[in-house]
Amino acid sequence: MESWAEKGDEGENVRITAQLLKAKTGEFALESILLLKLRGLGISELGCLGECASLEWLDLSGNAIAHLGPLAALKSLAVLNLSANRICSLEPLGACESLQSLNVAGNLLGSLQQLQCLAGLRRLESLRLHDARACLSNPVCATGAYRSALGDLLPGLKAIDGERVSGRGSELYQLCRDLDSSLERGGSGGAGSLEPPGTALPWVEEGYWEQRPARRSSIMEEAYKQFNDVLQECRELSERADDTISQAERALSVRSDPSSYVF
Protein backbone atom coordinates (compact mmCIF):
# COMPACT_ATOMS: atom_id res chain seq x y z
CA MET A 1 0.00 0.00 0.00
CA GLU A 2 1.41 3.39 -0.95
CA SER A 3 1.83 6.15 1.62
CA TRP A 4 1.11 9.78 0.76
CA ALA A 5 4.09 11.02 2.79
CA GLU A 6 7.03 9.67 4.71
CA LYS A 7 7.20 11.06 8.25
CA GLY A 8 10.31 11.57 10.32
CA ASP A 9 10.67 10.99 14.05
CA GLU A 10 8.02 12.72 16.13
CA GLY A 11 10.66 14.29 18.39
CA GLU A 12 12.55 15.95 15.55
CA ASN A 13 11.90 19.56 14.67
CA VAL A 14 14.92 20.89 12.80
CA ARG A 15 15.19 24.41 11.43
CA ILE A 16 17.73 25.27 8.75
CA THR A 17 20.31 27.73 10.04
CA ALA A 18 23.43 29.32 8.58
CA GLN A 19 25.53 27.10 10.86
CA LEU A 20 23.84 23.97 9.53
CA LEU A 21 24.38 25.02 5.91
CA LYS A 22 28.03 25.90 6.44
CA ALA A 23 28.65 22.61 8.26
CA LYS A 24 27.06 20.60 5.46
CA THR A 25 28.81 22.36 2.60
CA GLY A 26 32.05 23.75 4.00
CA GLU A 27 31.22 27.13 2.46
CA PHE A 28 31.66 30.31 4.53
CA ALA A 29 29.26 32.40 2.43
CA LEU A 30 25.73 31.13 1.81
CA GLU A 31 25.72 32.85 -1.61
CA SER A 32 28.54 30.49 -2.72
CA ILE A 33 26.54 27.29 -2.21
CA LEU A 34 25.57 25.70 -5.54
CA LEU A 35 24.63 22.16 -4.46
CA LEU A 36 22.94 21.18 -1.21
CA LYS A 37 21.87 17.78 0.09
CA LEU A 38 19.77 17.82 3.29
CA ARG A 39 18.04 14.46 3.03
CA GLY A 40 16.36 12.80 6.02
CA LEU A 41 17.37 15.29 8.73
CA GLY A 42 13.92 15.85 10.23
CA ILE A 43 13.77 19.39 8.87
CA SER A 44 10.42 21.11 9.34
CA GLU A 45 11.37 24.77 8.79
CA LEU A 46 13.46 26.07 5.88
CA GLY A 47 14.77 29.02 7.87
CA CYS A 48 17.50 30.96 6.05
CA LEU A 49 17.62 28.68 3.01
CA GLY A 50 16.41 31.56 0.84
CA GLU A 51 19.76 33.29 1.37
CA CYS A 52 21.51 30.70 -0.82
CA ALA A 53 20.94 32.87 -3.88
CA SER A 54 23.21 30.83 -6.19
CA LEU A 55 21.76 27.44 -5.30
CA GLU A 56 21.15 25.28 -8.39
CA TRP A 57 20.61 21.75 -7.00
CA LEU A 58 18.68 21.02 -3.79
CA ASP A 59 17.65 17.74 -2.13
CA LEU A 60 15.25 18.08 0.83
CA SER A 61 13.67 14.62 0.55
CA GLY A 62 12.63 12.59 3.57
CA ASN A 63 12.00 15.47 5.97
CA ALA A 64 8.90 16.98 7.61
CA ILE A 65 8.55 20.12 5.50
CA ALA A 66 5.08 21.60 5.02
CA HIS A 67 5.76 25.19 3.94
CA LEU A 68 8.06 26.24 1.08
CA GLY A 69 8.09 30.03 1.49
CA PRO A 70 11.90 30.60 1.52
CA LEU A 71 12.32 28.68 -1.77
CA ALA A 72 10.69 31.56 -3.67
CA ALA A 73 13.99 33.47 -3.42
CA LEU A 74 15.99 30.77 -5.25
CA LYS A 75 15.96 32.17 -8.79
CA SER A 76 18.83 29.93 -9.98
CA LEU A 77 17.40 26.66 -8.68
CA ALA A 78 17.21 24.09 -11.49
CA VAL A 79 16.78 20.71 -9.74
CA LEU A 80 14.63 20.28 -6.62
CA ASN A 81 13.77 17.08 -4.73
CA LEU A 82 11.00 17.50 -2.13
CA SER A 83 9.83 13.88 -2.04
CA ALA A 84 8.57 12.32 1.19
CA ASN A 85 7.54 15.48 3.06
CA ARG A 86 4.22 17.02 4.18
CA ILE A 87 3.66 19.56 1.43
CA CYS A 88 0.16 20.54 0.36
CA SER A 89 0.98 23.76 -1.53
CA LEU A 90 3.62 24.48 -4.17
CA GLU A 91 2.74 28.17 -4.55
CA PRO A 92 6.23 29.55 -3.67
CA LEU A 93 7.83 27.45 -6.43
CA GLY A 94 6.10 29.59 -9.04
CA ALA A 95 8.89 32.13 -8.49
CA CYS A 96 11.70 29.63 -9.18
CA GLU A 97 12.05 30.70 -12.80
CA SER A 98 15.04 28.42 -13.55
CA LEU A 99 13.42 25.22 -12.28
CA GLN A 100 13.80 22.32 -14.71
CA SER A 101 13.21 19.18 -12.62
CA LEU A 102 10.85 18.81 -9.64
CA ASN A 103 10.17 15.72 -7.50
CA VAL A 104 7.27 16.03 -5.05
CA ALA A 105 6.30 12.36 -4.77
CA GLY A 106 5.15 11.34 -1.31
CA ASN A 107 3.39 14.54 -0.25
CA LEU A 108 -0.19 15.77 0.31
CA LEU A 109 -1.09 17.28 -3.07
CA GLY A 110 -4.76 16.49 -3.62
CA SER A 111 -5.73 18.20 -6.87
CA LEU A 112 -4.33 19.49 -10.14
CA GLN A 113 -5.34 23.02 -9.11
CA GLN A 114 -2.50 22.90 -6.59
CA LEU A 115 -0.11 22.52 -9.52
CA GLN A 116 -1.47 25.49 -11.45
CA CYS A 117 1.23 27.68 -9.89
CA LEU A 118 3.84 25.82 -11.96
CA ALA A 119 2.30 26.83 -15.28
CA GLY A 120 4.55 29.88 -15.57
CA LEU A 121 7.78 27.88 -15.27
CA ARG A 122 8.84 27.72 -18.90
CA ARG A 123 11.96 25.66 -18.23
CA LEU A 124 10.21 22.93 -16.25
CA GLU A 125 10.63 19.65 -18.15
CA SER A 126 10.36 16.91 -15.52
CA LEU A 127 7.74 16.54 -12.77
CA ARG A 128 7.32 13.54 -10.47
CA LEU A 129 4.21 13.08 -8.33
CA HIS A 130 4.35 9.30 -8.09
CA ASP A 131 7.31 6.98 -7.46
CA ALA A 132 6.29 3.33 -7.58
CA ARG A 133 9.77 2.07 -6.74
CA ALA A 134 9.94 4.10 -3.51
CA CYS A 135 6.20 3.60 -2.76
CA LEU A 136 5.61 7.35 -2.70
CA SER A 137 2.62 9.15 -4.18
CA ASN A 138 0.12 11.97 -3.72
CA PRO A 139 -3.69 11.89 -3.31
CA VAL A 140 -4.07 13.44 -6.78
CA CYS A 141 -2.50 10.32 -8.29
CA ALA A 142 -5.52 8.23 -7.25
CA THR A 143 -7.19 9.46 -10.42
CA GLY A 144 -6.01 7.31 -13.30
CA ALA A 145 -6.15 10.12 -15.84
CA TYR A 146 -4.10 12.60 -13.84
CA ARG A 147 -1.08 12.25 -16.15
CA SER A 148 -2.92 13.25 -19.29
CA ALA A 149 -4.59 16.13 -17.42
CA LEU A 150 -1.20 17.18 -16.09
CA GLY A 151 0.17 17.18 -19.62
CA ASP A 152 -2.61 19.56 -20.65
CA LEU A 153 -1.96 21.80 -17.65
CA LEU A 154 1.82 21.88 -18.19
CA PRO A 155 2.37 21.26 -21.91
CA GLY A 156 6.09 21.96 -21.64
CA LEU A 157 6.73 18.79 -19.63
CA LYS A 158 8.86 16.13 -21.31
CA ALA A 159 8.74 13.61 -18.44
CA ILE A 160 6.00 12.81 -15.92
CA ASP A 161 6.74 10.40 -13.06
CA GLY A 162 10.00 9.44 -14.77
CA GLU A 163 8.35 8.52 -18.08
CA ARG A 164 8.96 10.43 -21.28
CA VAL A 165 5.77 11.99 -22.60
CA SER A 166 7.31 14.03 -25.41
CA GLY A 167 10.58 14.27 -27.23
CA ARG A 168 13.12 11.50 -27.65
CA GLY A 169 12.06 8.19 -26.07
CA SER A 170 8.39 9.03 -25.66
CA GLU A 171 7.34 6.63 -28.43
CA LEU A 172 8.88 3.69 -26.56
CA TYR A 173 6.99 4.51 -23.37
CA GLN A 174 3.74 4.80 -25.31
CA LEU A 175 4.37 1.45 -26.96
CA CYS A 176 4.97 -0.19 -23.58
CA ARG A 177 1.77 1.31 -22.16
CA ASP A 178 -0.25 0.10 -25.14
CA LEU A 179 1.24 -3.38 -24.75
CA ASP A 180 0.38 -3.45 -21.03
CA SER A 181 -3.18 -2.40 -21.81
CA SER A 182 -3.51 -5.16 -24.39
CA LEU A 183 -2.23 -7.77 -21.96
CA GLU A 184 -4.63 -6.59 -19.26
CA ARG A 185 -7.59 -6.82 -21.63
CA GLY A 186 -6.49 -10.25 -22.75
CA GLY A 187 -6.25 -11.55 -19.19
CA SER A 188 -9.52 -10.08 -17.93
CA GLY A 189 -11.51 -13.20 -18.79
CA GLY A 190 -14.48 -11.21 -20.13
CA ALA A 191 -16.49 -11.83 -23.26
CA GLY A 192 -14.06 -9.82 -25.32
CA SER A 193 -10.95 -11.55 -24.03
CA LEU A 194 -8.43 -12.92 -26.46
CA GLU A 195 -8.38 -16.58 -27.42
CA PRO A 196 -5.56 -18.71 -25.95
CA PRO A 197 -2.58 -18.53 -28.26
CA GLY A 198 -1.74 -21.53 -30.39
CA THR A 199 1.68 -22.85 -31.32
CA ALA A 200 4.19 -20.05 -31.47
CA LEU A 201 5.64 -19.50 -34.91
CA PRO A 202 9.21 -18.41 -35.49
CA TRP A 203 9.77 -14.82 -36.54
CA VAL A 204 12.39 -15.75 -39.12
CA GLU A 205 12.94 -18.65 -41.46
CA GLU A 206 14.53 -21.85 -40.24
CA GLY A 207 18.30 -21.68 -40.39
CA TYR A 208 18.33 -17.86 -40.41
CA TRP A 209 20.70 -17.67 -37.44
CA GLU A 210 23.05 -20.43 -38.62
CA GLN A 211 26.53 -19.31 -39.49
CA ARG A 212 27.13 -19.22 -43.21
CA PRO A 213 30.50 -19.43 -44.96
CA ALA A 214 31.82 -16.10 -46.11
CA ARG A 215 31.16 -15.36 -49.74
CA ARG A 216 33.61 -13.47 -51.93
CA SER A 217 32.38 -11.48 -54.86
CA SER A 218 34.28 -11.17 -58.11
CA ILE A 219 35.21 -7.62 -57.16
CA MET A 220 36.74 -8.79 -53.90
CA GLU A 221 38.62 -11.57 -55.68
CA GLU A 222 40.12 -9.07 -58.14
CA ALA A 223 41.06 -6.74 -55.28
CA TYR A 224 42.85 -9.57 -53.47
CA LYS A 225 44.71 -10.46 -56.68
CA GLN A 226 45.85 -6.89 -57.26
CA PHE A 227 46.95 -6.56 -53.67
CA ASN A 228 49.04 -9.73 -53.87
CA ASP A 229 50.64 -8.50 -57.10
CA VAL A 230 51.61 -5.19 -55.52
CA LEU A 231 52.95 -7.02 -52.47
CA GLN A 232 55.12 -9.21 -54.67
CA GLU A 233 56.51 -6.15 -56.49
CA CYS A 234 57.38 -4.58 -53.15
CA ARG A 235 59.27 -7.71 -52.13
CA GLU A 236 61.24 -7.68 -55.39
CA LEU A 237 62.11 -4.01 -54.97
CA SER A 238 63.26 -4.70 -51.42
CA GLU A 239 65.57 -7.47 -52.65
CA ARG A 240 67.04 -5.19 -55.34
CA ALA A 241 67.63 -2.48 -52.76
CA ASP A 242 69.44 -4.96 -50.51
CA ASP A 243 71.70 -6.03 -53.40
CA THR A 244 72.52 -2.40 -54.29
CA ILE A 245 73.40 -1.58 -50.68
CA SER A 246 75.64 -4.66 -50.43
CA GLN A 247 77.52 -3.71 -53.62
CA ALA A 248 78.06 -0.17 -52.34
CA GLU A 249 79.42 -1.44 -49.04
CA ARG A 250 81.86 -3.77 -50.81
CA ALA A 251 83.05 -0.98 -53.08
CA LEU A 252 83.72 1.30 -50.15
CA SER A 253 85.61 -1.36 -48.21
CA VAL A 254 88.08 -1.87 -51.09
CA ARG A 255 89.17 1.78 -50.92
CA SER A 256 90.73 1.50 -47.47
CA ASP A 257 93.67 3.80 -48.26
CA PRO A 258 92.84 7.31 -46.96
CA SER A 259 94.94 8.89 -49.68
CA SER A 260 92.61 7.46 -52.30
CA TYR A 261 89.76 9.78 -51.21
CA VAL A 262 89.55 13.13 -52.91
CA PHE A 263 88.22 16.11 -50.96
Image (spheres, rainbow, N blue to C red):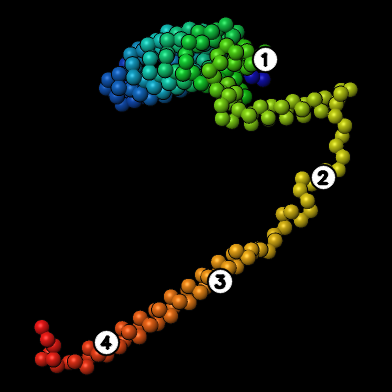
Question: Dot 4 corresponds to which residue?
Answer: 249
10 Å neighbourhood of mark 4: few (<14), some, or many (≥20)?
few
Where is residue 68, by image quadrant?
Answer: top left
How far separated are the C-alphas under marks 4 and 2? 77 Å
Q: Residue at x 70, y 61 (%)?
A: 212
In the rendering, which numbered label is found on residue 225? 3
**SS class, disc 3:** helix
Q: Is residue 81 visible?
A: no
Q: Type of residue at label 3?
A: Lys
Q: Horizontal placement of 93 versus 181: left or right?
A: left
| Front in this rendered view, residue 89 or 218 | 218
Question: Percent x, y for residue 170?
Answer: 60, 28
Mark 3 and mark 1: Cα distance apart in space: 68 Å
Query: Mark 4 against mark 2, which lies toward the viewer?
Result: 4
Q: CA distance from mark 1 to mark 4?
A: 93 Å
| Left or right position of 120 against 48 | right
Question: Which residue was labeled with disc 1?
Answer: 145
- Residue type indicated by callout 1: Ala
Q: Which mark is residue 201?
A: 2
- Badge 1 crowding class, 10 Å Cα cut-off, few under 14, some 14 to 19, many 20 or more, is few
Q: Are marks 1 and 2 in contact (CB under 8 Å)?
A: no
Number of numbered callouts drawn: 4
Separation of residues labelled 2 and 3 (CA atoms): 46 Å
In this view, the residue in front, 25 or 204, is 204
> Could you say where residue 200 lies in the image, as x and y percent from the top left?
83, 43
Q: Answer whether residue 98 is visible to the viewer in this image.
A: yes
Q: Is residue 206 above or below residue 163?
A: below
- Tell me the amino acid under the disc marked 4: Glu
Q: Of label 1 and label 4, which has the lower sequence position?
A: 1
Q: Which is nearer the N-term, disc 1 or disc 2? A: 1
